Image (cartoon, rainbow, N blue to C red):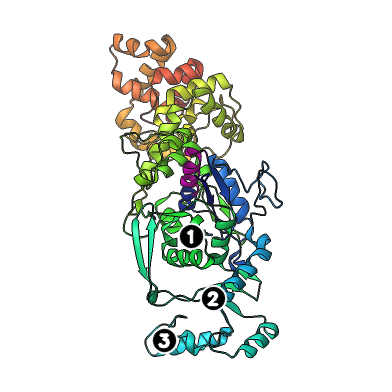
């Protein structure tokens, strides 16, 4: 039995999509379950698509998720460049392995599986235009290769001359004719493809002395002793070529097994989940915030407030199911439970509500003290410095209503500062439709910050209807004469209208008509501050 070795082989062409993170995760789970190795290899041979910062982004994203490569990246998160016992196949960046590939391309030419092609970019463009003019498309394949400028059509001495004189030739794979390639996929089962439908792909380019994806990928998977290739469905069309390359090299014995993962689909409609869907519907498609070199930014799960555990869990469930009702899995539990035979063949629809549900569940599982510690810096940014114990007690009371730590402020800002806006009657605190209570300037929690612009119309329009002067008197009396937990009792025993008085008190305290219990609010801000808020409202009314 060979030791299980899988790899994640991203190209640093931009931020890693959540689908890419899922590919990395499934590889990681597969390897860890078998006590094998998870290798990170950077496939950066397409210099035209290289994006500065993308490699760092990939590594940071995996780290955030807790998906740590065994090989390819060192403790400091650097891609390893020189071989060592732990990283025997270094370098792991294909651009730094460029010297390796040419001999393999030449080997295929020598064995008749590949050939040199000398067609210039202009010649290929012309062939393309001609094909299109007659309603077809140009393909470099068994039908056209005999009419093009390559080592199959040119005399040998001409080929020799061109190889030394020109620097723009390529090596192309000689796609065999009339063959059915029989393949096997661990998720999809047997697949067969007729080679007549395939073209002669470029394997190596003299211009930059670099292999294309196909050659580099096969050579490196072979040299790095990869046993299973688990990757996205978009690579399925390349599979016949990859099979044929293993055959051409005579490496069938050690050829890895393949598993192509289903696509992540849009929440509504058909098609691949894209950044545009996220922008439109308000969810991220990238693990971390990304700022492109051209200044374009994209939101990330981390910055949106997701816990990495929740993100990993929701990704795991997009395409895989455990075969039971269980939905919440830690990374270790996933390692135990994961299996490729429970990965679906068809695309997995992304559901942003479900994603939030996962975070809510993880938030509830987090100890209150941890959540308070995560919340504290956000409050400090607003100039507030509450004590951690106080914060932990607040968290215990409100965490059930929150999805993200940043929701705590929306739910309970009035425990720290007097409200600056008043929600009209019937608007629920913390509901999506509520305007966040977010005063522009941080204030002393004792200070009264009534936002006149927001308050005035409310007071003028609604207060007469609901809160008559006698209600104010009743509320003040109750506040002056009772404790938070006996407030209601006091109002009742003095035959005042309980509902109206309580609503007024709540509005004065919190700025909203619903939310935390009045006794709870008063327990945090104290009766004095409560009275102050109520008196202020009364003053405003004259
Ligand atoms: N470099 C390819 C990518 O960007 C890797 C495909 C594979 O895993 O073979 O996804």
Tell me the distance, in whole angstroms, between the alpha carbons under discs 3 and 2: 27 Å
Instruction: Please state the extent of the stretch shown in magenta in the rendering.
Output: 24-35
Which image quarter is the C terminus in? top left
Q: Secondary structure at mark 3?
A: helix
Q: Mark 1 or mark 2, which is nearer to you? A: 1
Vertical position of residue 102 compared to residue 328: above or below: below
Instruction: Please name which of the two marks, 3 or 2, marks the residue nearer to the observer.
Output: 2
3D distance between C-alphas at marks 1 and 3 = 39 Å
Residue 255 visible somewhere in the drawing: no
Residue that mark 1 sits on: 252
Q: Residue at x 66, y 72 (%)?
A: 208
Task: Say if the magenta span includes residue 33.
Answer: yes
Q: Which labelled disc corresponds to residue 526?
A: none
Look at discs 1 and 3 and give the one toward the viewer.
1
Q: Is residue 253 magenta?
A: no
Q: Closest to the observer: 253 or 214?
A: 253
Q: CA distance from mark 1 to mark 2?
A: 18 Å
- Residue 217 x/y as whole percent: 55, 61
Binning the other alpha carbons within 10 Å of mark 1 as few (below 14), some (14 to 19) or many (20 upward) gives few
């Amino acid at each position: 039995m060979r030791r299980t070795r899988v790899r994640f082989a991203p190209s640093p062409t931009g931020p890693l999509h959540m689908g890419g993170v899922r590919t990395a995760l499934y590889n990681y789970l597969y390897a860890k379950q078998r006590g094998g190795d998870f290798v990170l290899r950077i496939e950066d041979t397409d210099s035209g698509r290289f994006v500065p910062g993308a490699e760092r982004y990939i590594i940071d994203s995996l780290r955030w998720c807790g998906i740590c490569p065994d090989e390819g990246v060192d403790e400091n998160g650097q891609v390893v460049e020189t071989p060592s016992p732990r990283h025997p196949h270094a370098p792991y960046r294909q651009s730094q392995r460029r010297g390796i590939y040419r001999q393999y391309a030449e080997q295929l030419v020598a064995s008749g599986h590949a050939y040199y092609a000398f067609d210039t970019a202009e010649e290929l463009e012309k062939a393309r235009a001609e094909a299109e003019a007659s309603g077809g498309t140009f393909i470099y394949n068994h039908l056209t290769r005999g009419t093009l400028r390559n080592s199959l059509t040119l005399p040998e001495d001409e080929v020799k001359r061109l190889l030394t004189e020109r620097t723009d030739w390529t090596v192309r794979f000689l796609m065999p004719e009339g063959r059915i390639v029989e393949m096997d996929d661990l998720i999809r089962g047997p697949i067969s493809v007729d080679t007549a439908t395939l073209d002669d792909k470029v394997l190596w380019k003299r211009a930059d002395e670099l292999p294309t994806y196909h050659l580099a990928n096969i050579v490196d998977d072979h040299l790095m002793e990869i046993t299973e290739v688990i990757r996205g469905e978009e690579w399925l069309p390349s599979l016949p070529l990859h099979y044929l390359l293993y055959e051409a090299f005579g490496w069938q014995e050690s050829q890895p097994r393949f598993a192509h993962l289903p696509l992540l689909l849009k929440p509504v409609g058909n098609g691949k989940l894209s950044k545009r869907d996220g922008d439109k519907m308000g969810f991220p498609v990238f693990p971390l915030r990304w700022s492109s070199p051209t200044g374009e930014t994209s939101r990330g799960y981390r910055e949106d407030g997701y816990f990495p555990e929740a993100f990993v869990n929701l990704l795991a469930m997009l395409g895989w199911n455990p075969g039971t009702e269980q939905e919440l899995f830690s990374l270790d539990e996933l390692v135990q439970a994961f299996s490729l035979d429970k990965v679906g063949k068809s695309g997995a629809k992304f559901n942003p509500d479900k994603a939030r549900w996962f975070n809510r569940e993880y938030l509830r599982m987090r100890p209150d003290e941890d959540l308070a510690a995560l919340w504290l810096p956000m409050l400090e940014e607003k100039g507030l410095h509450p004590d951690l114990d106080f914060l932990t007690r607040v968290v215990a009371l409100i965490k059930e209503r929150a999805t993200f730590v940043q929701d705590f402020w929306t739910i309970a800002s009035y425990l720290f500062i007097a409200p600056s806006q008043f929600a009209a009657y019937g608007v629920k605190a913390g509901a999506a439709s509520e305007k966040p209570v977010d005063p522009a300037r941080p204030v002393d929690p004792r200070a009264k910050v009534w936002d006149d612009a927001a308050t005035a119309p409310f007071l003028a329009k609604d207060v007469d209807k609901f809160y008559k002067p006698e209600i104010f008197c009743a509320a003040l009396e109750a506040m002056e004469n009772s404790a938070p937990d006996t407030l209601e009792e006091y109002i009742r025993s003095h035959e005042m209208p309980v509902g109206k008085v309580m609503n007024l008190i709540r509005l004065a305290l919190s700025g909203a008509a619903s939310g935390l219990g009045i006794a709870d609010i008063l327990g945090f801000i104290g009766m004095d501050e409560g009275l102050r808020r109520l008196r202020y409202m009364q003053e405003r009314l004259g």
